[in-house]
């Protein structure tokens, strides 16, 4: 029998965390602000999710949206947030750091990884913004990073499948290479077949209508590129189940 692929679902709410677990996810990546690509979840969110779900939680440590070249103050924020995540029961720590020239920020990656121990570390899709994937890959191996989340330096992992497949092969048992950043029920089997990945990452996203009955059409609380004010993006239990059935 083929080895069961581990399914990680990216979530930013208690509701989505519960849906991911109910749908058969093996682990959740807990963030805030998925529209920004995922930022550090609040202490309150992490605490409540830890109380409500039994599956492992990978906690995102990312202080802001945008690039992955952080200031000294932002790095200090990440250090503090990492301590909080460990105290509140995270099982995996997720982060990514780059230098201005597009190389892995080796010194600070090593420092955060050390702070994370004994928890394993996932280096997230900051890797996809690195200037040279193989240079970045060797650095992460040297630092003992356990897991790499990547779309193969392309918009989706299906487009980046050749690089992902080679990363999986070269990583062997030294590091888990986890395709993510656009995995759906439609492309999952192709990605798994061609990459031979043992873990997969998806948001399994859906929309839930707001519970608000009164709606002011003249005011919007976010930027113009934000999601609809009265539609909440959540993980869909049905889509998680569909992914689980295919993996």
Image (spheres, rainbow, N blue to C red):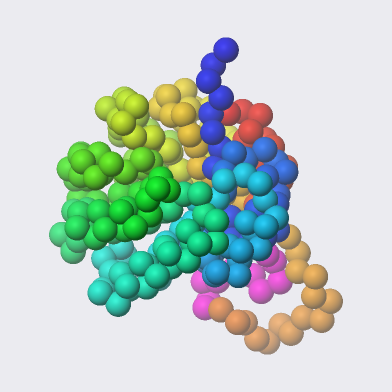
Q: 46 left or right of 157?
A: right
Front residue (pair 193, 146): 146
Q: Is residue 106 above or below residue 139?
A: below
Q: Quadrant of residue 166?
A: top left
Q: Is residue 64 visible?
A: yes
Residue 74 at x, y = what percent? 32, 73
Residue at 28% in and 41% down: 144
Q: Is residue 12 magenta?
A: no
Q: Quadrant of residue 229?
A: bottom right
Q: What main secondary structure does the magenta stretch of the protein show?
A: loop
Residue 66 at x, y = what percent? 36, 67
Residue at 71% in and 83% down: 217
Residue 165 at x, y = what percent? 35, 28
Quadrant occupied by the C terminus: top right
Residue at 36% in and 40% down: 146
Front residue (pair 238, 96): 96
Q: Is residue 125 visible?
A: no
The residues colored magenta run: 223-232
Q: Is residue 227 magenta?
A: yes
Q: Is residue 79 above or below residue 73?
A: above
Quadrant occupied by the N terminus: top right
Front residue (pair 172, 205): 172
Q: Farthest residue to the bottom: give it.
A: 218
Q: 10 left or right of 209?
A: left
Q: 6 left or right of 136?
A: right
Residue 91 at x, y = what percent? 51, 49
Q: Is residue 159 above or below residue 76?
A: above
Residue at 66% in and 46% down: 54
Q: Farthest residue to the top: give it.
A: 1
């Amino acid at each position: 029998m083929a080895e069961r692929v581990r399914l990680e679902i990216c979530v930013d709410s208690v509701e989505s965390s519960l849906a991911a677990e109910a749908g058969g996810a093996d682990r959740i990546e807990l963030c805030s602000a998925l529209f920004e690509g995922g930022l550090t979840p609040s202490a309150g969110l992490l605490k409540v999710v830890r109380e409500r779900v039994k599956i492992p939680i990978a906690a995102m440590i990312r202080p802001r949206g945008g690039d992955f070249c952080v200031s000294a103050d932002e790095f200090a924020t990440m250090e503090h947030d990492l301590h909080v995540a460990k105290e509140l029961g995270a099982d995996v720590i997720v982060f990514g750091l780059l230098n201005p020239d597009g190389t892995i920020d080796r010194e600070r990656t090593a420092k955060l990884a050390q702070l994370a121990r004994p928890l394993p570390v996932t280096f997230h899709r900051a890797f996809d913004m690195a200037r040279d994937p193989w240079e970045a890959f060797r650095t992460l191996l040297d630092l003992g990073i356990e897991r790499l989340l990547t779309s193969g330096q392309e918009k989706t992992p299906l487009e980046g499948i050749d690089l992902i497949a080679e990363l999986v092969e070269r990583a062997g048992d030294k590091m888990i290479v986890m395709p993510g950043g656009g995995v759906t029920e439609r492309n999952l089997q192709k990605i798994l077949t061609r990459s031979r990945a043992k873990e997969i990452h998806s948001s399994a996203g859906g929309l839930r209508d707001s519970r608000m009955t009164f709606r002011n059409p003249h005011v919007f609380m976010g930027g113009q590129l934000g999601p609809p004010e009265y539609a909440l993006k959540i993980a869909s239990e049905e889509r998680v189940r569909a992914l689980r059935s295919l993996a």
